[in-house]
């Protein structure tokens, strides 16, 4: 199990990568936003002494134990699955505002609050 | 006139620790022997299965009703079984990914988890377009179409 600190460092690394992604690769904005969310959530789970072994396990636990975080995290999970497969034109501004600016920010705020980092 | 009372019939009692031999006679007369303990476990299994089936049927009806309420947004709905449980796929009308539909989907997802604890499921939504095959997400031939 990776440590809380390792997950937070990975989340920060994902953020640095997010900051470099151009509109041309908007699908990767959604995917990297999701993975940053994963590391934030796993940092919280690590603090609680249990890590997840699959997306399904993480999702079930979030839904059951942290529904307010799940409400922000679930759209990241859904959208990353969709945008990874679709070849339709993607509006990068929507992804930046809805996923990165809204959902991911919401997950980060709540996780950091639980970890006493805000 | 004398009223005859039916003799009271004691129920057959099966205990999980009872190793008494029990002969089971199926309808085809192909008898077999087991123990009262195993018979008790078999009864419990069928009882649990029956309860699960009832809950599963209620889940299907609930999702169908939810889709009807959201008929302006939802075109189709499928339920697929995976190794991790049940995956409910809500296909939305229009070709764009519906960011504005995330919150109703999350509400449904949490509602299903609270109502149907024996049928854990996850809810996903994406646009109902002809360009992306459903098989990228699930096998439609093995999924139940609940709506549309």
Image (cartoon, rainbow, N blue to C red):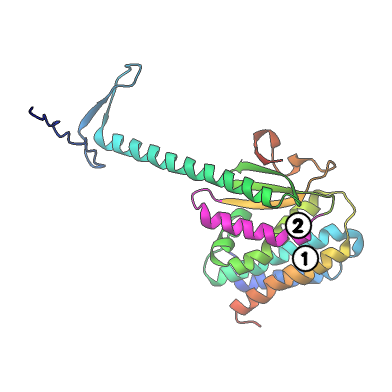
Q: Residue A13 — which label?
A: none
> Is residue B96 something that shows in the picture?
yes
Residue sitting at the far front: B1
Query: Who's the residue at 77% across and 62% down the image?
Result: A32
Give the residues drawn in magenta, as a range: B97-120
C-alpha span from label 2 to label 1: 8 Å
Count of marks overlaid on the render: 2
Query: Residue A34: x and y, percent?
Result: 73, 62
Report the quarter where the N terminus of chain A lies: bottom right
Q: Nearer the viewer, residue B27 or B30?
A: B27
Q: Residue at x 80, y 72 (%)?
A: A16
Q: In which chain is the residue bearing label 2?
A: A
The residue wearing badge 1 is A99
| Depth order, front residue of B77/A36 | B77
Q: Choose between A50 and B122: the one closer to the eye.
A: B122
Q: Is residue B115 magenta?
A: yes
Majority secondary structure of magenta residues: helix
| Quadrant where the image shows the C terminus of chain A | bottom right
Residue located at (59% from left, 63% from top)? A62
- Assess disc 1: are there few (<14), some (14-19) or many (≥20) residues with their C-alpha within 10 Å of its C-alpha: many
Disc 2: which residue: A79
Residue A87 located left or right of residue A105: right
Residue B39 is one of the magenta-drawn residues: no
The extreme left residue here reads B2
Q: Secondary structure at mark 2?
A: helix
Give the letter of the chain under mark 1. Answer: A
N-terminal-most mark, 2 or 1? 2
**Labels 2 and 1 share a subunit:** yes
The kind of secondary structure element at disc 1 is helix
């Amino acid at each position: 199990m990776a440590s809380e600190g390792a997950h937070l460092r990975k989340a920060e690394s994902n953020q640095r990568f997010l900051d470099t992604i151009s509109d041309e690769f908007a699908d990767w904005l959604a995917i990297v936003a999701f993975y940053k969310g994963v590391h934030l959530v796993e940092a919280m789970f690590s603090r609680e002494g249990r890590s997840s072994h699959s997306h399904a396990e993480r999702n079930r636990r979030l839904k059951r134990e942290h529904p307010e975080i799940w409400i922000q995290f679930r759209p990241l999970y859904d959208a990353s699955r969709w945008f990874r497969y679709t070849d339709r034109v993607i509006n990068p501004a929507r992804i930046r505002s809805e996923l990165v600016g809204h959902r991911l920010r919401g997950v980060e705020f709540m996780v950091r609050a639980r970890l006493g980092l805000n | 006139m004398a009223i005859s009372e039916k003799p009271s019939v004691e129920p057959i009692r099966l205990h999980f620790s009872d190793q008494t031999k029990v002969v089971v006679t199926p309808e085809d007369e192909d008898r077999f022997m087991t123990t009262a303990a195993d018979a008790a476990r078999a009864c419990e299994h069928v009882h649990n299965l029956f309860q699960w089936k009832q809950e599963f049927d209620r889940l299907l009806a609930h999702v169908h009703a939810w889709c009807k309420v959201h008929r302006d947004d939802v075109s189709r709905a499928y339920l697929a079984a995976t190794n991790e449980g049940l995956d409910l796929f809500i296909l939305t009308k229009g070709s764009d990914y519906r960011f504005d539909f995330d919150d109703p989907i999350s509400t449904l997802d949490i509602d299903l988890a609270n109502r149907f604890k024996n049928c854990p499921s996850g809810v996903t939504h994406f646009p109902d377009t002809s360009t992306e095959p459903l098989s990228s997400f699930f096998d439609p031939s093995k999924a139940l179409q609940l709506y549309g």
